[in-house]
Structure formats: structure tokens, C-alpha cells
Amino acid sequence: MSATSATPAATAAPPLPHGRRMVAVIVLVPTLVALALWAFAWPAARTAPRDLPLGVAGPATATAQMQKQLSQHQGAFEIHRYADEAAARDAIEDRTVYGAVVVTAQGPKLLTATAASPLVAQLLQQAVARQAPEGTKVTTIDVVPAPAKDPRGAALGASVLPLALVGIAAGSVVTLLGLRGARAVAALVGAAALVGVVAAALAHSWLGVFTGNWWAEAAALGLSTLAVGAAVAGLGALIGPPGIGLGAFVVMLLGNPFSAASSPPQMLPEPVGTIGQWLPPGAGASLMRSVSFFDGAAATGPALTLTWWAVLGLGAVLLGNTLKRDRTTTEAVAERKPALVS
């Protein structure tokens, strides 16, 4: 007589009692609120220059006094020396410094770049004016001005959150719809490319707040979206729906407030400024500023950061599909094994 050996069915974990659920909600919600307030309010409340790159140009004998005065702001500025005004202008256009003080016989001349940061341009005007001899007028020249239709540079800062949300949505939809492997990769890349084209059409062609190469801007916007979407979808492919929450947490509660889209990373408390530039929102904002206003200067670093996020995310999507297929195959083989004979 033959019989099949039975294996006990796995029992599902019992749901939490209602009391514990209520306690979990009561504790979790204030914790998330406190974390969000910390992430958004703390950097904003501690905004101040910290080793902000600033140039001083002119003969060494003439600039020594100005450099000494600026160095009195403990830790505020990182001073770069330049031989003349032309070299200082080149440094500003290359995004090496945010501004420069040129010492002339007529008095100090301040070179700024409101396209890099209107906040820093205003801060430098105040700092140099305080250091100048009484009664001396400081001439200010905006080497790389912000767009006429967005003199405060608000549009770039405002674009960070929508791009992050779109990226999270793309990664979430791909995961929840069950798209896997090459299809998921194609969906993420296609969506990001379309977002880049639409966003460039709105910001550049319609609003006129971006003034660089149109296709470079579209590529930067699309890459920023793909970096977020791929990261969220990759985590979803590896660990399931909780991966969506983890990806959204990193992007929204860390990447967005730490992005330094409205002020330089050197204006944020450490290590927030550094961390923000390694996350997609911060790298995306830096890349957009470079391609939109500085002809691509200093774009390599943020572009590589976004590329790594996109490549690793898409790789995780493909890996998750392979692991799931292997598990399915193993389970199917196990089910086809002949019954044991007793």
C-alpha cells in the first residue's frame, strides 16, 4: 500500500491585536512627524556659510589685507587666490568659486553669480561692504546672472520635489503592476525620457526659467527622474512593497531637504550638505544648475552620481526578476517530485 507523505501547512503569523495596532499608530505618526520636521527644519534653521569657496584677485600685496579681513569670519569662507579679474571670472564661470573680490586702486570690486545662488550673492555683498573702508563704494558685477524671468532662482529649487515625486511614482507603479525584467527597465527609461522632454518644454520653452542647451536640460531632468524611479523599483524588486517605502523615505525625507537646491551645499550644516549631493535630488539640482546656466561646468560629478543610482537601480530590477524566476522554478521542480512510497 502506498501513501504520500504530508508536510504540515505553514501557518500565517497571527495579526496584531487591535490594542497593539493602536499603540503602533500612536507612536509611529509622531515619530515620522518629528523626523520630517528635523529633516526639513534643522538645515533651514542652521543655514550659514561654511568653507564657502570665494576668490580674491589682484596683486598679493594689495589683496593681503582683504584676505585677512575675510578670514576673520571663522570657517565661513575658503579663500582662493587669483592673479587678476579675468582669472577670477573664469573661476566663477567654471563653478570653482561662488564669487570673487577684485582689489583695485579705486576700491574693491565684487564679482558674483546669481545663477549659482542669489542668496550667496547677497551674502557676499554684505560681507564685502562691511570690510570695505568707510565711504568706499563697492562695485558689484554679476558675472553669471540668473534668468530675467526667475531672478531669485526659485524655479530650480521648486523643481526638485516634483521630479522626486514623479520618480517615486514611476518606480511604485512599475512594482505594483508586476512589471519585471526588461519590461520594467524599458518602462522606467521610457517614462524618465518623457518626463525630461515635458519638463524641459515647460521650464525652458514656456516659462523661460532655464536658459541652457534644451536637449542637455531634458537629459538632466530625465536622468534625475530615472535615478529615483530605478532606485525605488529596484528596492521593490528585491524586497517587495516595503522597498517602495524605503526608497520614498530616502528620497523624500533625506534627499529632498538635503538637496541644497536653493542654497549651496556649503550653506548647510555638515554632513547634510555632503550627504545631499550623493542622493538623487541634490545631484539632480546641481546638474540642472550646471547645464542650465554654466554651459555644463562642474556637471561631471552630479551626472556620475545620478548614473550610478540609475544603473544600480535598474540592475536591482533585473536581479530581482532573476531571483524570483529561480524561486519559481525551484518550487515547480519540488512539486513535480514523485510521492514517497511508504
Image: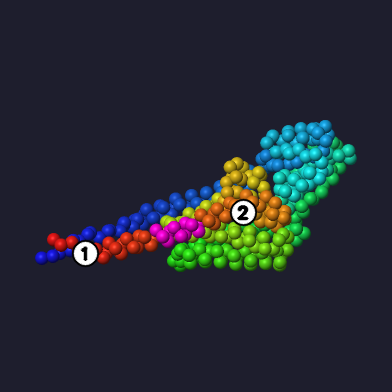
Quadrant of image for the N terminus: bottom left
Q: Secondary structure at mark 1?
A: loop
**Number of residue marks:** 2
Distance CA(mark 1)–CA(mark 2): 55 Å
Asked whether, in this view, residue 85 is left or right of residue 281, the answer is: right
The residue located at (84%, 45%) in the rendering is 139
Q: Is residue 181 shown in magenta?
A: no
Disc number lying in front (1 or 2): 1
Q: Position of residue 286 (x, y in %)?
A: 65, 52
- Contact check, label 1 and label 2, Cβ < 8 Å: no
SS assignment for the magenta stretch, majority: helix
Quadrant of image for the C terminus: bottom left
Q: Secondary structure at mark 2?
A: helix
Find disc 1 in the rendering and name its residue: 338
Q: Position of residue 4 (x, y in %)?
A: 17, 63
Q: Is residue 316 shown in magenta?
A: yes
* Amino acid at the residue labelled 1: Pro
Q: Residues within 10 Å of mark 2 (few under 14, many from 20)?
A: some
Task: Decide which of tag 1 and tag 2 comes sooner along the chain.
Answer: 2
Q: Is residue 285 above or below residue 64?
A: below
* Amino acid at the residue labelled 2: Ala
Which disc number belongs to residue 303? Answer: 2
The residue located at (83%, 35%) in the rendering is 59
* Front position in the image: 59 or 232: 59
* Front position in the image: 266 or 311: 311
Answer yes or no: is residue 40 visible.
no
Q: Which residues are magenta?
A: 313-323
